[in-house]
Image: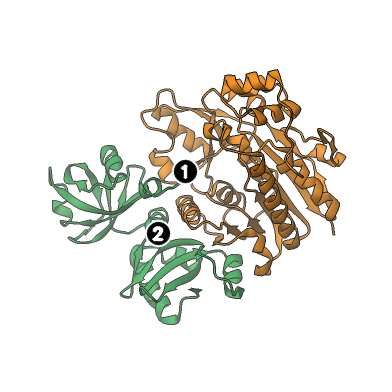
Chain colours: A orange, B green
Amino acid sequence: MKTLTFVPTQRSLRLAAKYGYDEWIVNRFLQFVPNVEKLMETMQEPVQKYIRTNTLKIASEQLVARLVPKGFELKKTVLANVFEISTTNAQVSIGATTEYLLGHYYIQDITSCIAVEVLDIQPNQTVLDMASAPGGKTTFIAQKMNNTGSIIAMEPNPRRTRSLSFNIARCGVMNTLIYQMDATECPCLNISFDRILLDAPCSGEGVMWKDASRRTSRTPDDVSECSLVQKKLFESALQVLKPSGLILYSTCSFAPEENESVVNSILKKFDVEVEPIPFGIEGLTRFDKTVFDERLRRTVRFYPHIHNSTGFYIAKLRKKN
Amino acid sequence: MFRRANREELTQLRRSFDKWGIFEFMEAQQLMIKEDRTINKKEVLITTKTSKDILNLQIFQPEYAGLAVGELRNKKFLPSLSGAEVIARHSRHFPYVVVNERAEGLVLYGRDVLGDSVLEVSKKLGQNKIVIILNQNRESIGIGKTRFSAENIFKKDEVTVYTFFDAGIYLRNQDDR
């Protein structure tokens, strides 16, 4: 699907100028994001941080008991072991405490944690993590498996592979094999997987809150290119997924071309079913004149102004027998 | 390449594991060796049965596998930071120094340990010995080498333990999170 752009309007021009975005991005948001101005206001504010307890090393109660005296405030979230964090009285940053260095927790957005949570990972399974660096989701998967079974983590970039290996060591993960390779080549390993996480490389619209440079550094072509790569990765993944196995597709993009459109093309081509996800708001079933499969309502979107998280999209599919 | 430890290596490792007090723990683990003959390096790692089976069957070798707990060097096992953590968690007798909170922060920036900050040491600790540096929660924060034996290790205003590796490396070497 070619990236759709729309004729500039007074509103899109005004919002783009006011908040420092390229007009084409804002104009697209106006087509499908609920309450766009609120979204843009939220993305002017500091980003909400979350941490996930690494239960391979410490229990959440113990972690809270160690971080609170250091001046951190931790609030419970919809997920056990994931906390909203504020650092009003802390002397050091949340990424520089002894507990962080010892791998007692991982700084990770709640949407990334939800992606792993809904994949229904069980101990002793074989799991593929297709774009794994820097390792937030990989280490959470290992935690869900209690360091049993096997995770095949793929990452083509050598620098990011190294970063992934550091996080795996820091978190005490034993069950992972890191392959420095393009995940579209995963069928050449001849391994079948119970679960696959495809947190696909994307245009990163959803992380504009963290990285304001993305508000003006992307083009419609970037979205189209990402969409092509995502479809290739998805198709490769389905070749190595066991029958009845689950695949979770996610991006940190708002773009329908990278989300519903990708999943829609997979639904047309493969015998898979979309499974419901008990978080977020339902996925789009149309974008401009394009109508998607009704089952895409079961996929979910996350928005900063609604969910206090980065922008995110998740689809959970089960391969039929 | 990743491979199983041979009989000779297993004997050497078991002897070292016994000295570090982790013989029983390591016997229950799936042990592998990552050998790089170009630099004569043998890394020791622990992994799961499923990962070990995949490694043994695969033609394609991964870049990293399991948890690298140390190196086999000159027939002896030298723990890595992850190995030191395994030892601190599972061993009852191993060479260590416990440091105060201020020194903990300094060690995590790669600084050496001053005698004033040492709170406790293991029994019969000798000079020039590899030690695990523990914080007051008895968690491994680094690996060092003693400059003095136990009786002189508390010397004021003198570095008494050199820090070789510290957990701060996870922050200093991190490209992105």
Number of marks present in the image shown: 2
Q: Residue at x 44, y 81 (%)?
A: B7
User: In the image, residue A232 lies at what x, y percent?
Assistant: 71, 56
Q: Which residue is situated farthest in the bottom direction here? A: B7
A7 in relation to A122, above or below: above
- Which quarter of the rendering shows the N terminus of chain A? top right
Nearer-the-camera pick, A121 or A268: A268
Left or right placement of residue A155 versus residue B41 in this view: right
- Label 2 Cα crowd, 10 Å radius (few <14 / some 14-19 / many 20+): many
Between the C-alphas of marks 1 and 2, the distance is 16 Å
Q: Chain of mark 1?
A: A
Q: Which residue is situated farthest in the front direction here? A: A7
Secondary structure under tag 1 reads loop
User: In the image, residue A134 lies at what x, y percent?
Assistant: 52, 49
B57 in relation to A8, above or below: below
Q: Which residue is mark 2?
A: B83
Left or right placement of residue A297 versus residue A195 in this view: right
Q: Residue at x 48, y 33 (%)?
A: A64
Q: Quadrant of residue A286?
A: top right
Q: Looking at numbered disc 2 in the image, what kind of residue is underneath it?
A: Gly
- Which quarter of the rendering shows the C terminus of chain A? bottom right
Question: Is residue A117 visible to us here?
Answer: no
Q: Looking at numbered disc 1 in the image, what kind of residue is underneath it?
A: His
Q: Which residue is mark 1?
A: A104
User: In the image, residue B94 lies at what x, y percent?
Assistant: 32, 59
Left or right placement of residue A9 versus residue A141 in this view: right
Left or right placement of residue A11 versus residue A75 in this view: right
A292 in relation to B73, above or below: above
Q: Residue at x 48, y 73 (%)?
A: B1
Tell whether label 2 touches label 1 (CB within 8 Å). Answer: no
Q: Chain of mark 2?
A: B
User: In the image, residue A275 lies at what x, y percent?
Assistant: 80, 44
